[in-house]
Amino acid sequence: MKIYFYFLVSLFLAIQLNAQEKIITGIITDESGPLPGVNILIKGTTTGTTSNFDGEYAIEASVGDMLVFNFVGMKTSEVTVGSENIINVLMEADSNCLEEVVVVVGYGRSLKGKISGLFIRRNRKSKPVINYSNPVSANESYKEINENTFKSSQLNPLSTFSIDVDKAAYSNVRRMINNGQKIPKEAVKIEEFINYFKYNYSQPTSEQPFSINTEVAETPWNKDTKIVKIGLQGKDLDKENIPKSNLVFLLDVSGSMGDSNKLPLLKSAFKLLVNQLREEDKVSIVVYAGAAGVVLKPTSGDNKEKILNALNKLESGGSTAGGKGIELAYKLAEKHFVEGGNNRVIMATDGDFNVGASSDKAMKDLIVEKRKSGVFLTVLGFGYGNLKDSKLETLADKGNGNYAYIDTMQEANKTFGEEFAGTMYTIAKDVKIQVEFNPNKVQAYRLIGYENRLLNAEDFKDDKKDAGELGSGHTVTALYEIIPVGVKSKFLKNIDNLKYTKANSSNKSDELLTVKFRYKKPNGDKSIEIVEVVKDEKLTLDNMSSDFKFSSAVALFGMNLTKSKFTNKAKLDKVIELAKAGKGEDENGYRSEFIRLVKSI
């Protein structure tokens, strides 16, 4: 009887041991190499994860669980968990698919993350279908955007706006598309889509911090209008000329940051930044949840182990006192301010503030006061479901800063690796653009995007008026669609002829417009003006530069997503055609990824 009892106990313990969950890791590949974006699901549950950019994954599972590996254009694989802890999978192309589709989805180390999935399937008898059963959460917030319309050059000859180097909108919308979600119109900021990509503009040859690059051509989607490109190329700083940095990491460790695509991804992303630091750079870390505190006092950039240890110890929990965190971070940055250096707060959060000052207006008032300190700001958005994009955009716009959205380690590497200097080092601040259109050439014009960056004409020379910052090596592009004189358009409304103001018909100048730029040096208070004249050109699509074609494709894509009335019925196939024609060298593959993204819709 005793032996039988011990046998039952042993059997019970064995069953319990096998039932215990363990971490399964592995690498997913196809015949070309590592495969990012593969959905891994425990069959019969909603527990799953996604392979990262290197095809790696990790998931918590039990012996006997069935892991299902699913990827667009590939045969679904199923593997039963046994005694092993490493399961590598080689996926095969599905011959029933019309073509191979590559989709990069969120970086996942989620052990319990729910996979709503990207259900896009191609075969010979059907078109791609996106499952919209996973709408963007109502807890996410975006500023309302009222699309720019055509303006008469006689009534409104001046168009004035601030530059925008933020790139968050593109990576955020890319995340939505890859998750099969319906895209809120307000999430699409066309200027951020365009400026997500780098363009092959010439480096400045003068003492000015940026070069000016312009082109004029027939609008690819409307033969009756023209499109004008105005591009800025920020000067690349030599490593020996990069100033010392006084950086304060302001990290949200509240309860809402517990998801795998928030604090865990944040930690991994900031390790990329830490690895870029030099001995002369100093880093402090401030965290906030229900309250704010300093977890790392100023530490030399060559003491990477100490900095990384402080990051690794961070855990999430509690409410979110974002205002208190900002106050403390700026106080620390000001205390250790480096004259002539790069003084910057780098804030990482989902923006879901709920303790103390938390409204968009309260954040605006707070950050406007703090920017007077001379400390710049970088805002990084993480996660989804409660992303407060409107609040993060406000902080960046009003705080002499820039804003990026980090959804994958690939995006983190772009921000902190490839574009490290542009993200971290400002070479010109309060950069404004004012365009004067020649009414003898231009009947009406429309700025594509920049709706939240418009300025009054009198703001251009007002040095107290805040505007956008340009980082080292950054490119900024603005596109105007213009209706030439003599062209009839449904977008123009009839107005009475002006009695006292008339276009000078005797002026035969071939000048299309004059564009003026004003900027301040990073530590300056007085703006400097540059003037550039743009002459009329008769370029067709074939004569446009690759950059011009591609930026036009991105603009048209954004217009399609917002259901703009100015597309002239040009659809996504036109976007793909333009993007392919303008892909160019595409060293890092971002333009190819864009083409695949458009195809997936």
Image (cartoon, rainbow, N blue to C red):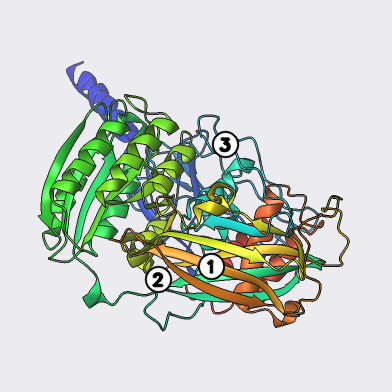
Q: Dot 2, crowdedness within 10 Å: few (<14), some or many (≥20)?
A: many
Q: Dot 3, crowdedness within 10 Å: few (<14), some or many (≥20)?
A: some
Q: Could you say which disc has been placed on residue 473 in the image? A: 2
Residue matched to label 3: 136
**Going by the image, does 298 lie left or right of 375?**
left
Please report the residue visible at 48 percent of the width from the left and 35 percent of the height from the top: 385
Residue 255: give x, y in percent of width and height.
Answer: 32, 29
Q: Earlier in the sequence, mark 3 or mark 2?
A: 3
Mark 3 or 1: the one toward you: 1
Please report the residue visible at 29 percent of the width from the left and 42 percent of the height from the top: 370
Against 397, residue 578 (above or below) is below
Visible residue check, residue 181: no
| Quarter location, residue 536 | bottom right
The type of residue carrying mark 3 is: Val
Q: Earlier in the sequence, mark 3 or mark 1?
A: 3
Q: CA distance from mark 1 to mark 2?
A: 21 Å
Q: Earlier in the sequence, mark 1 or mark 2?
A: 2
Residue 595: give x, y in percent of width and height.
Answer: 63, 64
Visible residue check, residue 427: yes
**Where, quadrant-wise, is the N terminus in this rendering?**
top left
Nearest the viewer among 468 and 220 is 468
Q: Could you say which disc has been placed on residue 182 in the image? A: none
Residue matched to label 1: 516
Mark 3 or 2: the one toward you: 2
Secondary structure beneath label 2: loop
**Going by the image, does 105 lie left or right of 305?**
right
The type of residue carrying mark 2 is: Gly
Secondary structure beneath label 1: strand
Mark 1 or 2: the one toward you: 1
Please report the residue visible at 79 percent of the width from the left and 59 percent of the height from the top: 570
